[in-house]
Image (cartoon, grey):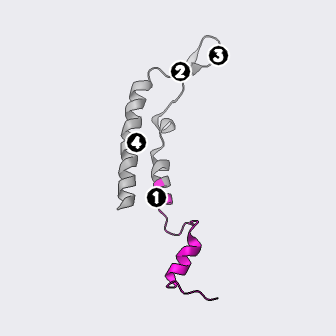
Amino acid sequence: MMKAAMLKQVDLDYRNHLQAWLTFAAKAEQKAGRGKTRPVYTTFQKFFNYKDSVANVLKSSNPKRRTRFRGIEKVLKKGGKDDG
């Protein structure tokens, strides 16, 4: 459920970045020599990488990732019993 909400947020971010791209694209230029300019972002994918954003969400929800509470998790799985 949480993964779906995070993916929905990525889609909203995509739409927001697309709107910003459309608004900003005509104005964004940088110097490219004497008296010349060129666009900063030549493609939308350089402005917002959708695949990387989705991959980051899917990677961050990996259940096998290490957390700082891993030791406490092991104790709780044993039922709180201490071996020592």
Of helix, strand and loop, which one carries label 3?
A: loop
Q: CA distance from mark 4 to mark 3?
A: 34 Å
Q: Amino acid at mark 1?
A: Leu
Badge 3 density bin: few <14, some 14–19, many ≥20, Cα 10 Å: few
The numbered mark at residue 79 is: none
The numbered mark at residue 29 is: 2
**Image-quadrant location for residue 21:** top left
**Image-quadrant location for residue 66:** bottom right
Q: CA distance from mark 4 to mark 2?
A: 23 Å
Q: Amino acid at mark 4?
A: Asp
**Image location of residue 75, percent across then percent down:** 55, 80
Q: Are marks 3 and 2 in contact (CB under 8 Å)?
A: no
* Residue closer to the observer: 65 or 17: 65
Give the magenta-colored segment's residue range. Answer: 57-84
Q: CA distance from mark 3 to mark 1?
A: 42 Å
Q: Quadrant of the N terminus?
A: bottom left
Of badges 4 and 3, nearer the viewer stands 4
Name the residue that disc number 3 marks: 33
Name the residue that disc number 1 marks: 58
